[in-house]
Amino acid sequence: MLSLIERNQHPIKYFFNTSGLKYRKLNLKDKVDQLTTKEASQLLASDGKLIKRPLMVENGKFTCGFKPDVYQENWNN
């Protein structure tokens, strides 16, 4: 996770399942933007339910969550 977060051009929040119960229970809405990449990767690794799904990783590229246009662009080549 740390490697993906470090290569990411989106905010750290991109990797988090923001609609998940665990995300809300931990009140991460107000905390996630202040996390370091290491803290975020440790938190995501501690509970898979915090990770936005699907998480697709292949040959150095990745996407988080499902958006049809993003999938078409990245995975149908």
Image (cartoon, rainbow, N blue to C red):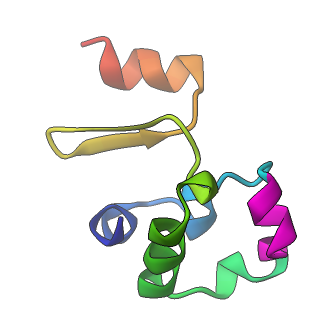
- Height in image: 13 above or below 64? below
Quadrant in the picture for residue 66: top right
Tell me the chief SS of the magenta region.
helix
Q: Position of residue 30 (x, y in %)?
A: 83, 79
- Quadrant in which the N terminus appears: bottom left
- Quadrant in which the C terminus appears: top left
25 left or right, relative to 55: right
The front one of 32 and 69 is: 32
Residue at (14% x, 39% y) in the render: 59
Total marks in image = 0
- The question of residue 25 being in magenta is answered with yes
Q: Which residue is most to the front? A: 47
The front one of 11 and 30 is: 30
Q: Position of residue 53 (x, y in %)?
A: 55, 39
Which residues fall within the magenta stretch? 21-29
Residue at (59% x, 25% y) in the render: 67
- The question of residue 41 being in magenta is answered with no
- Height in image: 44 above or below 15? below
Q: Position of residue 65 (x, y in %)?
A: 57, 37
34 left or right, relative to 60: right
Q: Position of residue 32 (x, y in %)?
A: 68, 77
- Height in image: 50 above or below 37? above
20 left or right, relative to 57: right
Residue at (51% x, 67% y) in the render: 44
